[in-house]
Amino acid sequence: MRALIYFGLTLLATVCQDIAVGQNRPNIVFILADDLGYGDLGVYGQTKIETPHIDRLAKNGLLFTDFYSGAPVCAPSRSALLTGQHTGHTYIRGNKEIQPEGQEPLAENVVTFAERLQQSGYQTGAFGKWGLGMVGTSGDPNRRGFDEFFGYNCQREAHRYYPNHLWHNDQRIELEGNNTADPQIYAPDLIQTRALAFIRAHSQEPFFLFVPTPLPHAELVVPEDSLFQKYKGRFDETPFKGSDYGPGAPIGYSSQEQPRATFAAMVARLDRHVGQLVETLEEEGILDNTIIIFTSDNGAHQEGGADPMYFQSSGNLRGYKRDLYEGGIRVPLIVHWPDRVDREQIVHHVAAFWDIGPTLLQLAQADSLPQSDGISFLPTLIGEAGQQTHPYLYWEFHEQGGRQAVRIGDYKAVRMNALRGAEAPVELYHLPTDIGEQRDIAEAHPELVQQAMEIMSAAREEHPLFPFWPTY
C-alpha cells in the first residue's frame, strides 16, 4: 500500500511539474522581413531611415553580428529556416514556380519545426508570405505545422501590395477591385491585423506566431499616410517605370515616381508593425515571457526601382540578393526575451537559419527535428556555457550559373559558375580583415581552398528537382 501511495504521489508530482513547465514555456514571435539588408536598420548603421521600434528590441536584447540567412533568395531560405537544413540538404533549393499560382511544395515527408511545436502543444499561426506550396498540396502551411495561415500563399503574388486576393487557410479571400489604380486594401496592413488578433486569441496558452511579412520587398508601393509624407521630397528621385496594373496585367512591379521615399516608408511601416506586435504583447501581459526574434530572409534587393547602394542597405558588405557574398546572405538578427535575455548585448556567435529550429525546439522542450544541420544557440541566448559551434556553414544557389559558398571559421570561400565544376575557381577571403570581400587570398592559402572544395562536394546531396551536378 505504501508503495502504491508513493507511486501515486510521484506520478501526481510529475504531472504537476509537467503542467508547470508547459505553462512557463515562452511564447514565440518570429518576424521575417523580406529582402531587408544588413544595413537597413538603425542599430546596424542605417542613417536615412528611422526604425525606433526594432532598434528598441535590440537595445533591450541581443544583436547578432554574424548571422546568416538560408539562401540569397526567398523560397530556399524559408525552407532552410523551417526544416533546419542548409541548401545542400533542404528540400526546396530554388524559386521553382508553379502555375497558375504557387511554388514547388515541401514534400510530404519533410518535417518543419512548426510541426514539432504544434505537436508539443503550441498554438501556431503564420501571417504573411509563404512560398513553400499551394493550398491543398503537401506544402500547404496547414499541413506543415500551422493551425492558421493568412496572407499570400504564392510569393509571386506577393509582388503586388494591392492584390485581388489573399488566402485564409484553404479559403480564397477576394479583395474586389483592389489595384494601384484604385488602392483600397494594403495587404501588409490587413495581414498585420490578423497577426495581432492571433496574439489576443491565444494569450493564455503557449503560441508560436510566424510573421513572414512581405515588407520591404519590391514592388515599391505604400499608402500615402504620415509615414510616406515623412520621407516624401527628402531624397533626389529617379522615377521607376514598371508593369502597371490593369485587366490582364502581368505580375511584376508597378511604376513609382518616388522610389527612395517609398522604400524608406516601407521599412518604416515594417518598423511600425513590429511596434504594434510588441504593444499587443504588453497589453495582454505576456511580453516578458515571449521571445521575439527578428531577421530577414536574404540580403537587400535591387528590383522595382530599389536603390540599396544609396541607402547602404548592405552596410560595408559586398553584394545583394542572389549573391553568396556577405551582402546576399548575412542578415540582421535581434532577439528580445525579457525573462531570460540580458539587455543590450552584441553577439558575435556565428549561426544561420538552420540553427533556428533546434534553438526554438530546445527552449520549448519539444521533440527535435529528424534531420537537421543546425545547432541550438540557446546557451548563447541565456548566457550559459557550453555553446557548440559549426565546423563550417554551407550555401548553394541554383541560378546564374550556380554558386557555392562556405564559411570556415574566419574564412569565407565563394565559387562562382559552380556548374562548371573544377574549372570554376574558388575565391577566398579573411572576414575579420576584409569584411567587404575585396582581397582574394586563395593563392596564398591553397590548403584552405582545398578544404573548401572538399566541403562543397561533401556537404550536399543531389536533388532531382534542383540539379546541380558540380564535377570535381
Image: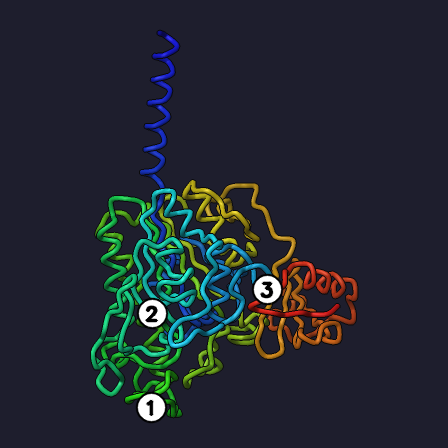
Q: Decide which of 210, 440 is in the foreground and name it.
A: 210
Label 2 to label 1: alpha-carbon separation: 26 Å
Q: Is residue 335 left or right of residue 271?
A: right
Looking at the rendering, which quadrant does residue 205 occupy?
A: top left
Specify few, some or many for label 1: CA neighbours under 10 Å numbering under 14, 14-19, or 20 or more. Answer: some
The amino acid on which the numbered mark 3 sits, given as a three-letter code, is His
Q: Earlier in the sequence, mark 1 or mark 3?
A: 1
Specify few, some or many for label 3: CA neighbours under 10 Å numbering under 14, 14-19, or 20 or more. Answer: some
Specify few, some or many for label 2: CA neighbours under 10 Å numbering under 14, 14-19, or 20 or more. Answer: many
Q: Which residue is mark 1?
A: 257
The answer to whether 79 is drawn above or below residue 154 in the figure is above
Q: Nearer the viewer, mark 3 or mark 2?
A: 3
Q: Which residue is mark 3?
A: 463
The answer to whether 343 is drawn above or below residue 274 in the figure is above
* Residue at 37% across, 86% down: 250
Residue 15: image x %, image y %? 34, 28
Residue 222: image x %, image y %? 29, 79
Q: Count up the numbered dots.
A: 3
- Secondary structure at badge 3 equals loop
Label 1 to label 3: alpha-carbon separation: 43 Å
Q: Which residue is mark 2?
A: 152
Q: Is residue 317 left or right of residue 365?
A: right
Q: How is the image coloured?
A: rainbow
The answer to whether 89 is drawn above or below residue 382 in the figure is below
